[in-house]
Amino acid sequence: MYLTKQEEQMFDGEQGTAVQLAMELLTKVGDIYGADQMLPIASAHTVMTPYRDILDAGVEICEKFAGYGGKYAVPTTLDPAGMDLQRWRDLKIPEEYAEKQMRIVRAQEQLGGIQVWTCTPYLHGNIPRPGQDLGWSESSAVIFANSVMGARTNRLTAVVDMAAGIAGRVPKFGLHLAKNRQGQALVKIQVDPKSITDSDYPTIGYFVGKQVDEKIPVLTGLPRTVSTDQLKNMGAAMAASGSVALYHIPGVTPEATTRERPVEKGEWEDTIELGMQELQQTQEEEMSTIRDGPVDFIAVGCPHYSPMEMRKLAMLLKDKKIHNNTTFWVYVSNYVEMLAKRAGYSRIIKASGAQILTETCMLVSPTHIYGFKTLMTDSGKCACYGPALCNTEVIYGSLEACVKTAIQGAFQ
Ligand code: F3S
């Protein structure tokens, strides 16, 4: 791989051991994928954050980079931690687990990570422009950055994301190259656009991810009025049920500016149709493991809720009471919690008996320790991973259905 003079110095350790280690790792990744040079990046986002996922080895890696004097060379935001960093004692997180989590927090502080502790960095100041190269991990954030913002990042893995932040570079391959960003599978959504609801978007994402796996889908038939939150939630599901890192919607996303095919030549590798029947089947048979009975855990906010989603939740929960046998947790960043508090949403949500948890989520914190039996969620990503990571049955439904279930204590 060609390295500039400065990059050679970094590789040789002239800018310290942390940078040297980062460059070694990045050049190895580049060699594997046939990259011929490094690209400077505008920002990084790292998942080296929840103890539940990165375990002791991850703690040691964070501390090693920090101990060698490493500092992020570009703005680097942090994904959720493995527990609510303020209320972990109230939530009965084991001391030993919390102690390891706090070691990660301290190491990331030393490295200069921007402590948003959220999977929605694009709502928290790490806002890329179209065409900018990034070094991001977190599948839901990566697909949003590529598709909705038109920035360029591969789905980096843990550790490689930290290395990218420390070196301020990534190897040039994959989605950094325009030729690799063209649509491959045409998805025709054959549902009346006016009838598509919030809860259909994660379902569409889930269905498409399963069908296309790693290919780049081009979705037609969605309304041009699709909201940022709907795109966020659809992409997260698509990146969870498949390995999708980029989608196009002609007339909506920046790299598909016309209603024509956003590729220059050749045939579609796949053409997929999605109608009402597939939507319903996906929601009921694939995103849910059961479809009735008591529900003891409702978890929403995956990806972390935006202020608009907190508003909607507050409106639904106003003057309602959550059933005694049901725990209702909503996950947000500290920043969104602050906005929700100022707007009065938090007061309404908490008055219902629901709790707002910050800086973590249902899948990266040890929710399995509570022994919940049935999880209900409005998140396609959570529906995908919930059974394994929360050790529960799962029911997928709209936020309206989650609230109704929370009040009744059961899904009917
Ligand atoms: Fe975010 Fe956790 Fe979901 S990191 S995308 S809320 S699994």
Image: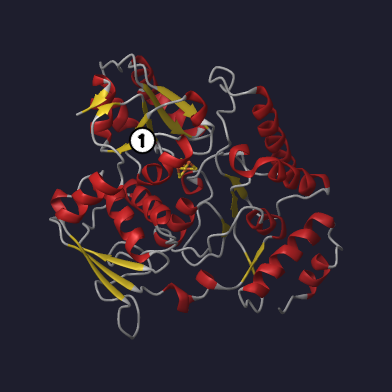
Left or right: where 235 falls relative to 78: left
Q: Residue at x 28, y 50 (%)?
A: 203
Mark 1 Cβ inside 8 Å of ligand 1: no
Left or right: where 139 falls relative to 378: right
The image quadrant that residue 211 belongs to is bottom left
User: In the rendered image, is residue 303 in sight?
Assistant: no
Describe the element under mark 1 as helix, strand or loop. Answer: strand
Mark 1 crowdedness (10 Å alpha carbons): few <14, some 14-19, many ≥20:
some
Q: Residue at x 48, y 63 (%)?
A: 151
User: In the rendered image, is residue 297 in sight?
Assistant: yes
x and y, in percent, of residue 334 in the image: 51, 31
Q: Residue furthest bottom?
A: 265
Looking at the picture, does residue 263 appear above or below residue 171?
Answer: below
Q: Which residue is mark 1?
A: 393
x and y, in percent, of residue 403 in the image: 27, 27
Front in this rendered view, residue 126 or 197: 197
x and y, in percent, of residue 341 in the image: 42, 23
Front in this rendered view, residue 337 or 376: 376
The image quadrant that residue 79 belongs to is top right
Q: Quadrant of the N terminus?
A: bottom right
Q: Residue at x 45, y 41 (%)?
A: 388
* Numbered marks: total: 1
Q: Quadrant of the C terminus?
A: top left
What colouring does the structure picture have? secondary structure
x and y, in percent, of residue 202 in the image: 31, 48
Q: Amino acid at mark 1?
A: Glu
Q: Residue at x 38, y 49 (%)?
A: 232
Looking at the picture, does residue 114 appear above or below residue 210?
Answer: above
